[in-house]
Amino acid sequence: MFEMLGITPQALYSQLLVGLINGSFYAVLSLGLAVIFGMLNIINFSHGAQYMMGAFLAWLGLTQLAGWTGIPGLQVSYWAALILAPLIVGFIGVIIERTMLSRLYKLDHLYGLLLTFGLALIIEGLFRYAYGVSGQQYGIPEQLQGAINLGFMYLPKYRAWVIGASLTVCFATWYVIERTKLGSYLRAGTENPRLVQAFGINVPLMITLTYGFGVALAAFAGVLAAPIFTVGPLMGSDLIIVVFAVVVIGGMGSILGSIVTGLGLGLIEGLTKVFYAEGSAVVIFVIMVIVLLIRPAGLFGRER
Amino acid sequence: MKRTLISVLVGATLATASFAASAQPAKKDAPQAAGTVKLSDGVVKIGVLTDLSGLYSDLSGAGAVLAVKMAIDDFRAMEKGKAFPIELVSADHQNKGDVASNKAREWFERDKVDMITDLVTTSTALAVMPVAKEKNRITIVNGAASTPITGKQCTDTNVHYTYDTYALANGTGKAVVKQGGDTWFFLTADYAFGQALEKDTGAVVQANGGKVLGSVRHPFPGTDFSSFLLKAQASGAKVIGLANAGTDTTNAIKQAAEFGITPKQTLAGLLMFITDVHSLGLKATQGMYLTEGFYWDFNDETRAWSKRFFELHKRMPTMVQAGDYSSTMHYLKAVKAAGTDEAQAVMKKMKETPVNDFFAKNGKIREDGRHVHDFYLLQVKKPEESKHPWDYYFVRQVIPANDAVTPVAQSECPLLKK
């Protein structure tokens, strides 16, 4: 069968694995978007910029901190950055939500979209002004250097870690939102905020923290991406359009949908790269069009 | 549901429209006596149409605008305050042909721009050149590289000044084959430039006894190249030719190391700029060959100009930015010599007069518009060999001008066949 397709099984397996790695990036990013849209009804166009900020913070912490503070040798390791960068970017997200987004909830979706799009342009512009577009290089942490021989390919240890870490974060998030009491408060809060508030739950705080968390997920993906991709101001805008397509295919606001479609589309994109590389940039959008025609609410979405 | 659809539609529209073209306010000259130079509307207006925000904005971008401004200032200083009025405008073409041609039309028709320069990406250059031809204005391509610019689609109002894919292929391609890299696989950016570079390099490889085993075309711009790199790895070729540029090249180099493809297979960066090497660092790029039309650390003259540029821009110039300066100066001198800013007369002077400055020695602009000048085959230094900041290359060979340009017999440009 493989001969018919003109590809060896080894090549196919390795391409599928590479697809899965990209898919896990899509999953984490689209999950953040889905959480924000599901709970806040905000289409967060600055998600790509926040992903970029996560990667940049990791790079700044590793290479620039010593120079800024004047303390030689002071640096934030990759592992610390994995926690710190999402916290910092999440906190910035909280400030954005409190000062700007919270004024828009009563208005149409479009206002939130335009605001976050504008924010993304500003953030990217600032980083471009400060560091240029050529990008910065972030090394792979020592513990994860090298590769594992799987027989059909050399899998870099770091890529294996990316799959593991992102799947863990994705399913933990899904579990918290869909299966715990906190998650049920959240879901109830978006369904009928006044009623939930009447039960003594601080809904605005919950919403603020949810936005902060969604943004932190983007930054987490950014730190994961830093050692693989060139850390540059445009790294987010290159990716974000695809991620939006993933969210739309999965069903806007559907947590499980975004995870499953993220991984699935990564695989499909990987296969397209094998058989018709020129089409790999559009395949996701073709799928989006088909899904929207057949199931306008997305694969896992509910009609509202 | 309706809300969802609306938001998706708006999202898609925004994504495609994204960054709107941003024209920068024109810099006004003090009105001066034009002397004996007859200007169509009292001023020579130069438009820098470039990538101010995308992936080529480091190798060109704001540095290109600065270089042109330096040329204008230097020309004025040379004329001791008696220069004709010159104005500079700039805009972002976002590497899109339609944006570029619309802006060019607006500049020519409404703003009376006389010359457009830089044009980084082939699609923008090829889109603007016919507009300029139609309006009888001049284009000077410094950023884009494809051979059709002075080949099939050449115009008599265009100069291709800095470099092209033919020169790159002949420099790097030949050198790598001679080092024993005789089987190639190409990783190609899927647009005019990448395809031209792949075609030109493939021809050079074959002419020198090498073999091309295959190629894969990746979307432009890309982020993850691992799938394509695995294909290149499976091909078993000794050399993987990177027919792309900017962050596409740097990402591919980084990921090739991650998957253990290098150093077993060699990478050949067919178009790398000093900004790419600066970004990747010497550790990741050491030993790579590349071809450029200019290197800042070549001689005292190049160093002197580049240090002036560095003072203002905080980065050393790429060949594109150096070419922007040199070509603008050549253009202004030609306007003065011709005594007019009329395109045909200025083009005649530009082609008659040899270019002699820090950028080129005895450079000559051919009938097809190609600026024939020396190129440099460079090799990236090891980290311990680099003595000071931006000391990145050994100049392995000065490629004589005539070896770096499509031979007249092979040219598809009708202007050469007259």
Image: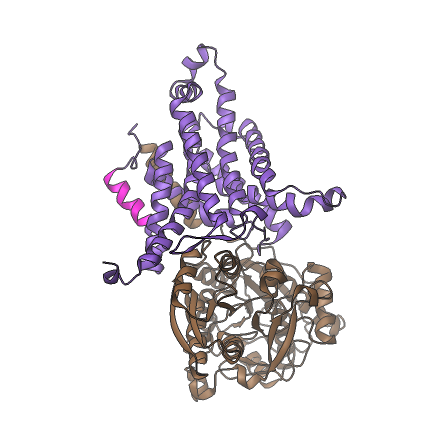
| Colour of chain A in the image | purple
Q: Does B94 appear above or below B145? A: above
For residue A235, say whether it is visible.
Answer: yes
| Colour of chain B in the image | brown
Image spot of residue B44 (x, y percent): 61, 69
At x 41%, y 64%, the residue is B232
At x 43%, y 68%, the residue is B186
Residue A285 on the magenta span: yes
At x 44%, y 10%, the residue is A199
The residue nearer to you, when weighing B79 against A194, is A194
Image spot of residue A138 (x, y percent): 59, 50
Image spot of residue B192 (x, y percent): 42, 68
Q: Quadrant of the N terminus of chain A?
A: bottom left
Image position of B179 (left or right of B328)? left
At x 62%, y 73%, the residue is B294
The residue range painted magenta reads A284-295
Residue that sits furthest to the top in the current view: A199
The residue nearer to you, when weighing A192 against B6, is A192
Q: Does B408 appear above or below B271? A: below
For residue A33, say whether it is visible.
Answer: no
